[in-house]
Image (cartoon, rainbow, N blue to C red):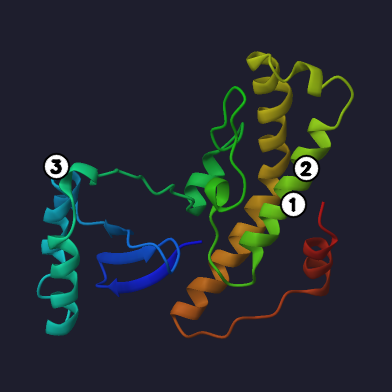
Amino acid sequence: GPVPLQVVDAGDTNFMCFNFNPKSPRIIWCLNSNKREAQHMVNPLDLFQFLEGKVDVETWSILENIRDETDLEHAMITNVKVQDMSQDTLNSMVKGWGGKGRITLIGDAAHAMRPMAGQGGNTAFEDCVVLYRILSEDHTAQSLKDSEFCDKQVVTRFEQSRLERVRKIHDDQRISAEKLYRKEKIEPWTPEFAKWVYSGV
C-alpha cells in the first residue's frame, strides 16, 4: 500500500507525498487547496506557490526537489467539491442524498459527520447492513440491470430509510463538536439515546 513520505499542512493548503512500496522509485503527490485562486489553475505545479512562505526553509527545499522532479506529462489537476453536510443541507433532503440509477453513496461520502463519537464509521456500517437487506430481497438481484428499478426500489428506498436516523445522529455530533470548539462541557448521552444508537438497525 501507499507509504507516506512527506505531509505538510499549511492551513488553506496541504501537501501529501507517497510511494507505493519501499522498492519502488516512483512517488505520487497530492496537493489540496481551498483557496479560490486554485480553482482557475491549469498547471499543477503552480499550486506549490501556495506553500511558499508558509513552511520552513528545510521543508520548502524538499518540496522544491519534488516539484522539480515532477513530469508535467503525468501531472493533472482534479477539481473535487466537498459535499456540504451541514444541518441545513440534511434537513432539506427529502428523497435521499443524491443517488440515482444504480449508484448510491454510503458513509462519509453520503453523510459526513464531525469526528466526536465514532458515528461516521458506525453509520457507514449501518448503511451497509440496510443496503444489503434490500439487495437480498426476493427478485432484487435479478432486476439490478434495470436502472429504473434500481433507482426507485433500491437507491431511493435505501436513502430515504436512512435519512431520519442519520439526521438525529448527525445533529448530536454537530452539537457536541460545537461545544468542544467553545470549550464548553459536553453532556453524555441519555440512557435512552445511547440505547437507540447502540441498538443499530
Tell me how far mark 2 sits from mark 1, CA to CA: 6 Å
Residue 133, percent from left and from top: 83, 38
Tell me how far mark 3 sits from mark 1, CA to CA: 40 Å
Three-letter code for the amino acid on which mark 2 is drawn: Val
Residue 166, percent from left and from top: 66, 51
Query: Helix, strand, or loop for circle 3?
Result: loop
Q: Residue at x 18, y 70 (%)?
A: 63
Q: Residues within 10 Å of mark 1 (few under 14, many from 20)?
A: some
Up/down of 2 relative to 156, above or below: below
| Front disc: 3 or 2 | 3
Mark 2 = which residue? 130
Residue 81: quarter of image: top left
Q: Residues within 10 Å of mark 2 (few under 14, many from 20)?
A: some
**How many numbered circles are shown?**
3
Q: Which mark is residue 42?
A: 3
Query: Helix, strand, or loop for circle 2?
Result: helix
Up/down of 142 relative to 183, above or below: above
Q: Are marks 3 and 1 in contact (CB under 8 Å)?
A: no
- As drawn, the residue found furthest toward the right would be 138
Q: Is residue 33 left or right of residue 81?
A: left
Mark 1 = which residue? 126
Q: Residue at x 53, y 55 (%)?
A: 112
Q: Residue at x 17, y 60 (%)?
A: 69
Residue 163, percent from left and from top: 66, 43
- Front-most of residues 126 and 179: 126
